[in-house]
Amino acid sequence: MFILLPDPTPLNLVLYAAFALLAVGMGPLDYFGLLTMRYSKFRGEGGISSRAGMFFVYFAPFLAALGFSLPYLSHLSLVQAILLLALLGHFAKRCIEALFLHKYSGPMDLPTTLLIASFYSFIAAGTSALNAAPLARADGLFWLGLAFFAVGEFFNFWHHKILVGLRGESREYVIPRGGLFERVACPHYLFELLAWLGIALLSRHLFVYLAFLGMFGYLLARSLKTLAWYRAKFPDFPKGRKALIPGLI
């Protein structure tokens, strides 16, 4: 089964319609500056430590995913265990990167921190809760999803490492080189999306597909703005590079 639908109760119809509108609107809201997330290149002047902010952004959903798994944690099926480990592993990896890998150039806006943490926590909680009603068995799409997740997480980390290595001891931005940075401005976003597509295929619930849609729209908007930022800051930025998907966008 490609998609697991919720019971068509009036409450579910309202909640899923609202979430679908949010998912569709996230990208345009950020791209057109109506709800800009103020961190990294688009940060404001003040705020909290980016390291602490980013850690909180990913630690809160880690706790949410773990908490909403408690009702079935003692009797996990193989499908449930793999999905839960993928979900927890993603946020644990991002926490470790926030603490020990990334280099930050300035503060992170507190409302942005709370907003992103809330959104990720909502997704983590919903995905984990729906894991109480998993796929009946691990089919071909399930294993494809696991492969997508593993490849996405590995190459997301690898491109984060490339960025850190390019900056050295400096906190200044440079033109990214190496890996898929030769083709797109934000390959780390591309592989994060691949990992989340993998999680969606592991879960197969409509909620997780909508979460992936929202992340795709947001990271596409963010990558387009990042590409424009690089081109404005560096006149010699390679003209052939795309924003997110090599040869397309």
Image (cartoon, rainbow, N blue to C red):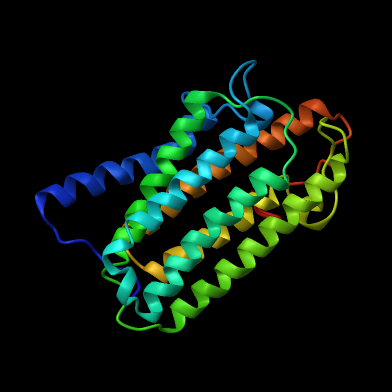
Q: Position of residue 215 (x, y in %)?
A: 48, 47
Q: Residue furthest left?
A: 10
Front residue (pair 154, 50)? 50
Query: Residue shown at 62%/19% (left/top)?
Result: 44
Q: Position of residue 19 (x, y in %)?
A: 31, 44
Q: Position of residue 241 (x, y in %)?
A: 77, 46
137 in relation to 240, above or below: below
Front residue (pair 64, 8)? 64
Query: Residue shown at 63%/41% (left/top)?
Result: 223
Query: Residue shown at 57%/61% (left/top)?
Result: 194
Q: Say if residue 213 shows up in the picture.
A: no
224 in relation to 133, above or below: above
Q: Residue furthest top?
A: 45
35 in relation to 24, above or below: above
Q: Quadrant of residue 226?
A: top right
Tell me: 168 left or right of 218: right
- Total tally of numbered discs in the picture: 0
Q: Say if residue 205 shows up in the picture.
A: yes
Front residue (pair 212, 203)? 203
Q: Position of residue 90 (x, y in %)?
A: 54, 58
